[in-house]
Amino acid sequence: PTADFLLPSQIYVNLGGFSDIAAALASETTIDWYASADSAKAITIAFAAKELSEHLATAGYPVSLNVGVPHLGTPGIYLLTASDQALVAELESRGSPIRFDKMQDQGFVIVENGGSLLLIGKTRIGCLYAVYALLDTLGFKWFSPSVSSVPNLQAGAIVAHLPMVEEPSRQYRGFWTF
């Protein structure tokens, strides 16, 4: 079944050891992306949160960013990965049919849960794809790096067709030249 859902005005992210979005993003060029999986995850989630909040603000729907260990009791938009095991376990205990163990690495789920919108990627990259899928669903379009379409969301942002489950048909999305 699909349902429409009014987008909350708070975004919640867990950035591990980083105190805020700016601190995480400032580390982008200094970490070893292969050896520092936790830092790589935090930086990608910070970028996803920044992209989401800036796009929504451009459309007239400002949101607040909240950094810390998220708890599903507060309505908001939660950017998560399957490695956030306590939250995924809580969803499963509520009867969620989401099966990340069978999902491709860049797959994601967008689901409403108790007044919150959960964007859960199997990996950090899957979470970023979930943000872009949500923005696309809200009416954002990118035709080229310099040409885009921004919806007017001042009257409220309705997310349709939930839950949304997507995964690539191949192991990785995008263009790879190696």
Image (cartoon, helix red, strand yellow):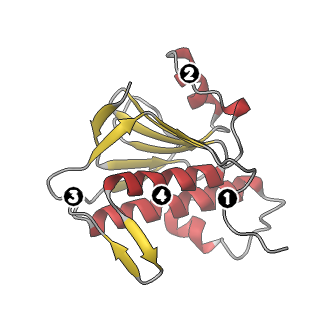
> In the image, is residue 60 above or below residue 15?
below
- Specify which label sits upstream in the sequence, 2 or 4: 2
Q: How far apart are marks 2 and 4 (CA)?
A: 23 Å
Q: Distance between the residues labelled 3 and 2?
A: 31 Å
State if disc 1 and disc 4 touch (CB < 8 Å): no
Identify the secondary structure beneath mark 2: loop
Residue visible at 40% across and 38% down in the picture: 117
In this rendering, which labeled residue sits more in front, label 4 or label 1?
1
Q: Which amino acid does label 1 sit on?
A: Arg
Q: What residue type is labelled 4?
A: Tyr
Residue visible at 58% across and 69% down in the picture: 25
In this rendering, which labeled residue sits more in front, label 1 or label 2?
1
Q: Residue 46's quadrant in the figure?
A: bottom right
Residue 153 numbered mark, or none: 3
Q: Position of residue 29 (x, y in %)?
A: 70, 76
Kindly identify which residue carries mark 1.
Answer: 173
In this rendering, which labeled residue sits more in front, label 1 or label 3?
1
Q: How far apart are marks 1 and 2 (CA)?
A: 24 Å
Q: Badge 3, how many Cα within 10 Å: few under 14, some, many 20+?
A: some
Which residue sits furthest front?
A: 169
Q: Badge 2, how many Cα within 10 Å: few under 14, some, many 20+?
A: few
Kindly identify which residue carries mark 2.
Answer: 97
Residue visible at 43% across and 74% down in the picture: 143
Q: Position of residue 138 (x, y in %)?
A: 32, 54
Which residue sits furthest left?
A: 155
Residue 132 numbered mark, or none: 4
Q: Nearer the viewer, residue 137 or 73?
A: 137
